[in-house]
Image (cartoon, rainbow, N blue to C red):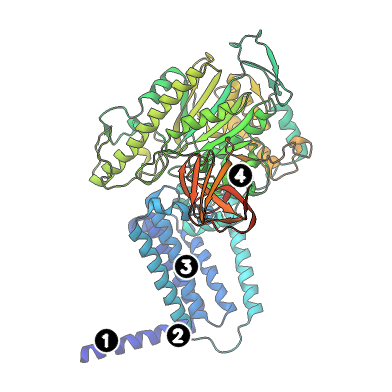
């Protein structure tokens, strides 16, 4: 009893002294808290106390700068009376950021950054595939407890008497912020800091979490290059972009009959369909040095690489970031010039139209079509694709009768039939951009598959082995799909080019020393064709892939395509030439998206397309009504089809592609307008059928 009282008294004395110290030295107190918070977030970021200490000792200037960033947040205390509460809230928020980053780095390689905040909606939709139900319960419970705790502190912590000098506080906060910007700018000029991060994970290790995270919030888009001008763009146009041309491979006969297509462009019957197949998290496990596989997981893809043009493809992300590899391939633009971790789909392409391989090929008569066996709303593709020149987009909401993985992702085998439907939907040549999803994480560490085609040895834990075998089983099935797709395209006896590549490596904790090529940012690509093109082994950047493919058949269209084609014509570039190539590329990208569009003489020739969701019309044929029950027959219904009666959605049962049913039809006397809408899992209507009028007497 006496000990407990003594302990309580000592606690009161300590608390009193602490409060007195904070009162006498508020600035020093905030700085010390900033140091502690900086240490905490770096321990969480690096998953190691030792690594944090090494960072502090080897890069003390960066540790101090990051501490100043956190310290600036405490300058906001000058604006309020509830200083203790706001100080506590700021501390909690920094710790939350550190914890979120720690958790994300356990799932992927890319650290938590500003772009993730723009992906909140998408993250919520797929959270169930990464988190168990009890994870969700813990998160909700933790959020509730945290909220309750902050409410309690808001009520209990004292307010400072008197009015705060808000004008002086605001001036100090503004001055401090400008000082940080000035230090940041000076650091960049001196080479101590960087604003563009080629490797985001490495940047967080080099420059610290607070700076990199703050940079990713503020730094978006492409900054105006110092040497950007109309004259510079004109010079690049004349000297570094190959002249526009539209020829074909010499292997295609010149005697082929000429056809005038729907766009009024003369083409031949030998105009090849060009299919891009972006394979989710696809890689070659036989190049993982730390494991042994019982057999080759990707025999079809390997056979194609040994027979057709192939090589390594350098991609902008690892473990995640499908849309960014996609962006580079479609536009020919290098993401290194954008903000750290930025997703252009979520920033500039929310408003701007962007030149793309789709727009380029449409100029010579192609139809630009996209397919994805995942939700059309993910990364906002259902709106963004119209600004990239696509005519149609077939997402999972327009597919039925597909199998799913244990984690709930649609298997890629459904894509063969979808590619068939797209090719059959037009009479001319098609550019089909297909995005797969089967290989998507996460990869469960418990044994969830009774049988796997390939067994793995060499990993230290059973959980790691289970995760690797699960991933490789998805690869094996994706490879079977690749074999089936190539066989189908061969049967069509139409000129074809099929470009296949992995969008990024899987989120399996791979390190550079685990890989044969020692590069986390490389996947494999292969270009199958039935045109008899010469085989070539060549390593490419993702933004060069489209230019390389089109050069094989003599197509020279589009700004970025022709710029890369001029570069790819030459071999063995010097370091100086490489730097000039990148500098001019940055100028072109800035001009196309943010500048005066001097490359087009001041005005873009491209307009947003009227993107049509799906290629098969969804329509109602007949409706049979029995009290509140409706049986709706028609064509091309899917599990995402929802009946709308007089503008309101009703609970709908998908019976088959020709039949929908509802038991809760609220009809009115007279005319009732009934439509079928394709609705995403985040409840966005992607398209709607023509209305059917049902008369009720």
Residue at horizontal 54%, vertical 58%?
A: 214
Q: Sequence order check: which comes first, mark 3 or mark 1?
A: 1
Where does the image place residue 609, in percent across and percent down from the top left? 68, 39
Q: Give the CA separation, mark 4 to mark 1.
A: 74 Å
Name the quarter where the N terminus is drawn.
Answer: bottom left
Q: Are marks 3 and 4 in contact (CB under 8 Å)?
A: no
Where does the image place residue 221, in percent across and percent down from the top left? 63, 48
Q: Is 307 displayed left or right of 73 in the figure? A: left
- What residue does disc 1 label? 7
- What residue does disc 2 label? 156
Q: Sequence order check: which comes first, mark 2 or mark 1?
A: 1
Closer to the camera in the image, 78 or 324? 324
- What residue does disc 4 label? 689
Q: Are marks 3 and 1 in contact (CB under 8 Å)?
A: no
For residue 661, which numbered disc appears in the image?
A: none
The reply to whether residue 468 is in sight is: yes
Q: Secondary structure at mark 3?
A: helix
- What residue does disc 3 label? 93
For the residues carrying marks 2 and 4, which lies nearer the camera in this image? 4
Instruction: Name the outermost residue toward the top.
Output: 255
Q: Sequence order check: which comes first, mark 2 or mark 3?
A: 3
Q: Secondary structure at mark 4?
A: loop
Q: Secondary structure at mark 2?
A: helix
Where does the image place residue 658, in percent across and percent down from the top left? 50, 39
Q: Sequence order check: which comes first, mark 2 or mark 4?
A: 2
Instruction: Name the outermost residue toward the front.
Output: 697
Name the quarter where the C terminus is drawn.
Answer: bottom right
For the residues carrying marks 2 and 1, which lies nearer the camera in this image? 2
Q: Give the CA separation, mark 2 to mark 4.
A: 58 Å
Task: Name which quarter of the figure residue 593 lies in.
Answer: top right
């Amino acid at each position: 009893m006496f000990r407990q009282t003594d302990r309580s008294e000592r606690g009161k004395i300590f608390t009193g002294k602490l409060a007195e110290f904070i009162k006498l030295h508020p600035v020093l107190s905030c700085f010390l808290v900033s140091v502690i918070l900086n240490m905490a977030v770096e321990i969480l970021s690096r998953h190691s106390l030792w690594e944090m200490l090494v960072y502090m000792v080897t890069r003390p200037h960066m540790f101090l700068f990051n501490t100043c960033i956190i310290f600036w947040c405490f300058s906001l205390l000058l604006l309020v009376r509830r200083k203790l509460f706001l100080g506590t809230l700021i501390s909690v928020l920094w710790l939350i950021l550190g914890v979120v980053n720690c958790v994300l780095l356990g799932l992927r390689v890319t650290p938590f950054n500003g772009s993730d905040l723009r992906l909140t909606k998408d993250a919520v939709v797929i959270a169930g595939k990464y988190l168990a139900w009890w994870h969700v319960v813990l998160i909700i419970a933790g959020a509730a407890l945290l909220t309750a705790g902050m409410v309690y502190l808001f009520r209990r912590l004292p307010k400072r008497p008197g009015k705060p000098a808000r004008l002086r506080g605001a001036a100090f906060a503004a001055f401090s912020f400008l000082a940080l910007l000035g230090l940041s700018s000076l650091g960049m000029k001196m080479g101590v800091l960087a604003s563009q991060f080629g490797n985001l994970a490495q940047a967080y290790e080099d420059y610290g979490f607070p700076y990199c995270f703050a940079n990713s919030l503020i730094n978006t888009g492409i900054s105006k290059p110092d040497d950007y001008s109309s004259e510079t763009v004109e010079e690049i146009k004349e000297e570094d972009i190959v002249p526009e041309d539209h020829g074909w491979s010499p292997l295609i006969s010149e005697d082929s009959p000429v056809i005038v297509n729907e766009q009024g462009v003369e083409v031949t019957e030998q105009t090849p369909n060009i299919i891009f197949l972006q394979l989710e998290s696809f890689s070659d496990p036989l190049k993982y040095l730390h494991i042994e596989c019982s057999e080759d997981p990707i025999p079809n893809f390997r056979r194609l690489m040994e027979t057709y043009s192939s090589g390594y493809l350098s991609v902008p992300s690892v473990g995640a970031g499908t849309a960014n590899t996609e962006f580079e391939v479609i536009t020919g633009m290098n993401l290194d010039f954008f903000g750290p971790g930025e997703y252009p789909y979520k920033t500039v392409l929310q408003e701007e139209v962007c030149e793309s391989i789709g727009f380029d090929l449409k100029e010579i008569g192609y139809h630009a079509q996209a397919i994805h066996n995942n939700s059309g709303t993910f990364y906002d593709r259902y709106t963004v694709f119209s600004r990239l020149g696509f005519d149609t987009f077939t997402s999972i909401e327009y597919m039925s009768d597909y199998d799913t993985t244990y984690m709930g992702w649609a298997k890629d085998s459904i894509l063969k039939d979808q590619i068939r439907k797209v090719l059959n939907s037009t009479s001319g040549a098609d550019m089909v951009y297909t995005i797969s999803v089967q290989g998507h994480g996460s990869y469960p560490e418990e044994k969830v598959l009774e049988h796997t085609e390939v067994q793995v040895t060499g990993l230290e834990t059973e959980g790691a082995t289970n995760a690797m075998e699960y991933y490789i089983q998805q690869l094996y099935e994706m490879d079977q799909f690749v074999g089936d797709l190539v066989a189908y395209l061969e049967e069509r006896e139409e000129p074809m080019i099929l470009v296949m590549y992995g969008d990024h490596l899987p989120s399996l904790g791979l390190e550079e020393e685990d890989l044969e090529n020692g590069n986390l940012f490389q996947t494999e690509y292969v270009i199958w064709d039935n045109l008899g093109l010469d085989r070539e082994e060549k390593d490419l950047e993702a933004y060069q892939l489209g230019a390389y493919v089109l050069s094989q058949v003599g197509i020279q269209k589009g700004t970025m395509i022709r710029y890369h084609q001029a570069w790819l014509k030459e071999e063995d570039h010097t370091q100086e030439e490489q730097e000039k190539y990148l500098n001019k590329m940055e100028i072109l990208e800035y001009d196309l998206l943010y500048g005066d569009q001097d490359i087009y003489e001041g005005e873009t020739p491209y307009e947003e397309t009227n993107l049509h969701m799906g290629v098969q019309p969804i329509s109602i044929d007949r409706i049979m009504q029995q009290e509140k029950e409706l049986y709706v027959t028609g064509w091309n219904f899917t599990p995402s089809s929802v009946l709308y009666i007089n503008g309101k959605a009703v609970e709908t049962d998908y019976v088959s592609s020709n039949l929908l049913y509802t038991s809760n039809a609220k009809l009115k006397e007279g005319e009732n307008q009934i439509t079928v809408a394709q609705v995403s899992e985040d409840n966005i209507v992607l398209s709607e059928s023509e209305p059917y009028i049902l008369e009720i007497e």
